[in-house]
Image (cartoon, helix red, strand yellow):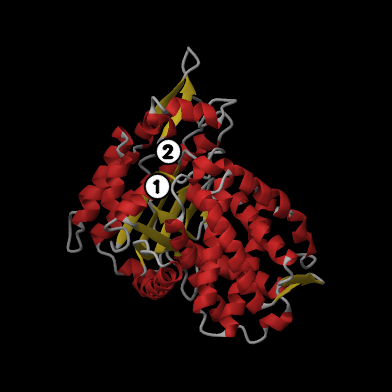
Amino acid sequence: MERLPIPGNHNEPFELFEEESGSSHPERARQERYIREYPLPKEVRQSLSKEQLQLLGHLIRAARRIDDLFGIQESEDFSFWPERIGESEIEAAAQSNSDIKSPYTVVRRNNEGDLVAIPVHVVFQDLIRETRIADSLEEAAHIARKGKFKDLQLSLYLKARSQAFNNGNWEYSESLWLPIGSDSKIMAVIGPYDNYLDPLKRKYAWESWVGVLDVETTETVRDYKERFLNWLGEETDEVVPKVAVRVDHTVIMSGQAAKYKWTGNSLPCQAELRREYGSVFTIFKPVFEDRLKHETLPTFRLIIDPSHRFGVTNEMIREVELKMSTGHEIGHSKVAQGIEQRLGGSSAWVKELFCNLLSLKGILALAESKREAGIALALAFVNAFLDFKSNQIDGSRYDYFVADCIMLNYCLEKRVVDINEGRLSYNSTEGAQITSELFDEIDQMQENGARVNSHWLFRNYYQPEVFSRFAPGS
């Protein structure tokens, strides 16, 4: 297995960047391959004890090194599966070896041509040792037990996570993280998660983030989360999922999380673990604010028809976008078990479309004014355009772009939106009805659909040339 060079000194001192005086939001993150680091607000840094700052340092060091592992997964010399493998062969081999389908393994052929599963921590064991990721987590676990603001539960989680890099017991440490993931002052997610990088959408890739809890914004989001879950329970007449939330002053994202520029993420990935333990979703505040300032607000002013922009302030857009992000992450808790096996490579964009539509349906139902509903519908298409631009620039966010493209073309076909002279206009009332109809179709597909269903939707509504109709220069 070829390795990418490991940048820097493993014992390099860490830095905690601070916002420049007078800046309301951090500027664009410094990026080194797939490492994105963000300023920690001065008042937040000053609120941390000496031990908490030391703890952050060890966690940041570990997160930086995760990108070395992810870099190999991105290289041409790496694959999660052997060449020319099909779903039927995977299912047949898994009958006698369930590790073949484990998200924590890499699959190869032995000398007889049979499929064998190798734990991901074994595949990367040399680089894990060289980068001292487990050592950094071990040191962080030790520091978490010290000082006035010691966090014993966090220490237990970090200790177990450190051991998982050596023994592969990822789900045990995950079970320790879930009860504390939304409330600990300082939190780190680090390891193999999310299957976006795997073409078959089964295997996890390396990623990490580290942040400090933003108490005020977290409380705001939790209020909307409760309203959304109450609506969801009444709408479905089902027991709502157990969902916790935190908004972070994120200081670093690396690996897969940085590649896809997530503004939020919901864990655990496995539907069975969500049912047993619930889920925690994190909103990465500096990423959210940065995207809002540099992308969402300018694009809203550029492609939305002036008749829909009159009287809409930046703060209104921010509030609605935060609600939409919350609803989207809650949606991941409703994704059906086994969707990857039933829909294969289509499962990723189907999940994103399901979450987008559930979030939109919820906010349209809960909107406190016609204007708020209109902003939500507009933002759905603003985000679609932004995902299109990201995909055009570097090929990223493909699954998000496919989901967005399908929704836009569906709404154009139903005549609830129109693009005229490069600007998008819409009917909020009819838009709510049509997007609800599309949601029902996608909900059935993700619950019990087959590949033929997702392929039909893709063939009929994935028409990316539609974005050429937006404003020139956009």
Residue drawn at (24%, 54%) of the image = 154
| Residue 125 position in % (x across, y down) | 37, 30
Q: Position of residue 328 (x, y in %)?
A: 49, 63
- The C terminus sits in image quarter: bottom right
Taking depth in this image into account, of 360 and 445 the one nearest to the observer is 445
Residue 374 sits in quarter:
bottom right
Answer yes or no: is residue 417 visible: yes
Q: Tag 1, which secondary structure?
A: loop
Whether residue 31 is visible: no
Above or below 139: residue 438: below
Residue at image mark 2: 103
Disc 2 to disc 1: CB gap under 8 Å = yes
Name the residue located 45 percent from the left edge and 37 percent from the top edge. 69
Q: Residue flagged by tag 1: what amino acid is it? A: Gln
Which residue is tagged 1?
A: 270
Label 2 secondary element: loop
Task: Pick the residue in front: 471 or 103.
Answer: 103
| In the foreground, 430 or 194 | 430
